[in-house]
Amino acid sequence: MRLIRQIAFRHLKAPQKGSFTTFTAILAILGLGLGIAALVLTFSILEGFESTISEKIARFDGHIRVEHFMNRTLKENDAVLDSALQKSPVNYSKTSYIQSPALLRKGSNADGVITIGLSKMGRESVLFSIITNGSTELKSKSIIIGKRLAEDLGIVIGDKIVLFDLQSIGRISGSQRFRQFTVTGLFHSGLLEYDKTVVYVDIVDAQYIFNVNDRISGHMLFTDNLDDVKPLYRHLESELGYPYFVLSWIDKHKILFDWINLQKWPILIIFGMISFVGIVNIISSLSMIIFEKVREIGTLLSLGLSKKHIKRIFLLEGLIIGVLGSLVGLVIAGGLAAIQLNFQIFTLPEDIYFMDHIPIKIDWLNTLLIISIGIISAVAASFWPVYRASKINPAEALRYE
């Protein structure tokens, strides 16, 4: 086995002056490395994009919402829901909310908004990570609005604005419901739809404006990590019946996530073809080594080395190229990912992609799978050159020696 290793490494190093085998081996390693790097980065970008979108949307909508099946209001303190949550299989936080359209007005400027009134318990899960200016605290008659909405209407922290209930505006009786608020904070999520239309107030103020007394639109539930969402969702679905409606953030934005999943396959197929080019390079490289080493193979066979050992030599060379190519690809992908994570060189238009830079999230399980497939493919690519090497006739190889 030691002799086989020595011969395999000697072939790839090719110490002879003017040998072409080292050059082809390097090309095969680089080709496979670039293919591996392309696949690892593609998976990482797709995972990063989906994860970033999920985190941003879940921050507003909650991982799970419990609402009325007919979109009516619910009691804030609900014994049935509380009983179901006490049996929860995972840790969670909960906040109650009121959500309804309203008209926001500052002087002569006005715009339609979605008003979300949050209860004191658990609202830090919604507000803490998105506030960019001002306070995260929602006191009575204070309001937090999106930074983009503030720019459009010329609003700054400390300004007075008025919220009108849209349903009451159209009433003939003229009993419009409204309340004046002081802007105490601005938020920025990167989701243009939310940054330009959503405003946050205390739930008591929302209940007054929308005339729902002590009732609510529903409950937002937040889990510690995304893996806990499915168990909690299934638990609530089994425990709660009519009139409760359980909705995950993915269900609410199903079209968006279906589109993301649809884009994965063509992207992976295209970059997979790049990796296939690396596999072809391995076949070419080993074939060149065999053609150049015909007389050496004949000599080894004449000295008593079996064809089985010759096969092992070239299979080992394919394995070496596969391992080195995979390591090169991992280094390239890791380096580019680290640069993007730290310096965010590659940017995106936030209005279109919901983020201002290309996100990276390395899934080590997928990365290990890609590297394993790369190594196995490199060894598999060696079989045809190995077959050619095993057919060499020692007498023919040494005829002109």
Image: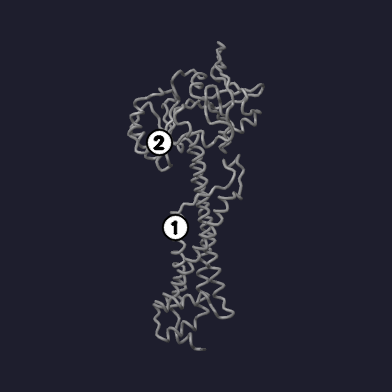
Q: In this view, does 70 lie above or below 281?
A: above
Q: Which residue lies furthest to the top in this view?
A: 173
Q: Please name which of the two marks, 2 or 1, marks the residue nearer to the observer.
A: 2
Q: In this view, does 143 lie above or below 131?
A: above
In depth, the one of 210 and 247 nearer the eye is 210
In the rendered image, which quarter is residue 179 located in? Answer: top right
Which amino acid, by three-letter code, is at mark 2?
Answer: Tyr
Which amino acid, by three-letter code, is at mark 1?
Answer: Leu
Point 52% across, 29% down: residue: 137
Report whether 23 appears left or right of 204.
Answer: right
Give residue 237's position: percent from left, percent from top.
36, 34
Q: Are marks 2 and 1 in contact (CB under 8 Å)?
A: no
Q: Is mark 1 on a helix, strand or loop?
A: helix
Q: How far apart are marks 2 and 1 (CA)?
A: 32 Å
Residue behind mark 1: 368
In depth, the one of 293 and 351 nearer the eye is 351
Q: Which of marks 2 and 1 is nearer the N terminus?
A: 2
Point 44% across, 61% down: residue: 372
Residue behind mark 2: 92
In the rendered image, which quarter is residue 305 located in? Answer: bottom left
Give residue 273's position: percent from left, percent from top.
52, 59
Give residue 230's position: percent from left, percent from top.
39, 40
In depth, the one of 127 and 252 nearer the eye is 127
Q: Judge the density around disc 1: few (<14), some (14-19), many (≥20) Cα neighbours within 10 Å.
A: some
Q: Is mark 2 on a helix, strand or loop?
A: strand
Label ID, residue 271: none
Q: Is residue 283 above or below residue 69?
A: below
In depth, the one of 340 and 164 nearer the eye is 340
Report whether 105 appears left or right of 40.
Answer: right
Q: Is residue 354 above or below residue 104?
A: below
